Amino acid sequence: MSETYLMPLTVPQRLLILVMMRMARNDNEDFLTEQLLPRSRKDLRPRDFSMSARNIIATDQVFFQTATDFPTVAPMVKSAVDRAVAYGKRHPEIGDVIADQAALPDPTPDFEVGLVMSYRQRKRLAFFCFYHIFRSLQVLDLADLGRLVPGIILLDKLIPQNRHFKRQTLLFDDIDLATLAPIVLGVSENYSGYTGILTQMLDGVQSKNTELWGLLNDLVNSTHGDLN
């Protein structure tokens, strides 16, 4: 029996594998979908997978290539890439392939805006974000799947890492904010308490990117009216 290795994967990491494999027309797409999609759309916890050396290498290469093509993915996949590199130091079959792998890119955003959110707000937004990605996976053409990458990155930032019910400040770049705004508006149709996040978002963007501020302001006002 061949040796297996334990690889913890978060839900965003698993979604990223599915998207990239579907774009590559991978023969194992149906199997991957069954294995990697959460059993419930409300289950956003990481999960441990027993993987062969071949699959550890494949996972590492998917993440590394995606981070090269979309540098903002790098922080999201770092934990899995680090785990693969650590295995490569101890297991020649893995190390022979990825020993000379370069460091992940270290992108610097043009600007970031800090949004103060509670645990419950983040969790509701994460559920809504995941549901949108899940539905889009079912209907988007291969050529359009790359549009899901910003949403997957955003989902990684939204999922609470632990049960701290205190309000916390999260940093979002301009792509995150453009992706987050319609999600906040969608959730706020059913739950109160999101006006403050929209106000923070508009105030934070106004002095840094007037074009994005105008687009977000028009979107918010078309749904909520003047927040002031």
Image (spheres, grey):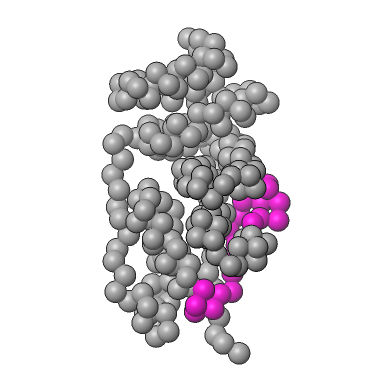
Would you identify the image quadrant in which residue 30 lies? Answer: bottom right
Would you identify the image quadrant in which residue 66 lies? Answer: bottom left
Camera-nearest residue between 193 and 174: 174
| 191 in the magenta segment | no
Would you identify the image quadrant in which residue 85 lies? Answer: bottom left
Q: Is residue 189 among the parts visible in the rendering?
A: yes
**x, y (%) of residue 3?**
55, 85
**x, y (%) of residue 156?**
50, 48
Camera-nearest residue between 30 and 25: 25
Tell me the quarter of the image containing the N terminus.
bottom right
| 50 in the magenta segment | yes
Q: Which residue sits at x=60%, y=63%?
A: 29
Q: Which residue sits at x=29%, y=66%?
A: 102
Q: Is residue 21 above or below residue 90?
A: above
Camera-nearest residue between 204 and 129: 129
**x, y (%) of residue 206?**
35, 20
**x, y (%) of residue 107?**
30, 48
Q: Is residue 205 left or right of residue 46?
A: left
Q: What span is in magenta?
A: 37-55
Q: Which residue sits at x=44%, y=37%?
A: 176
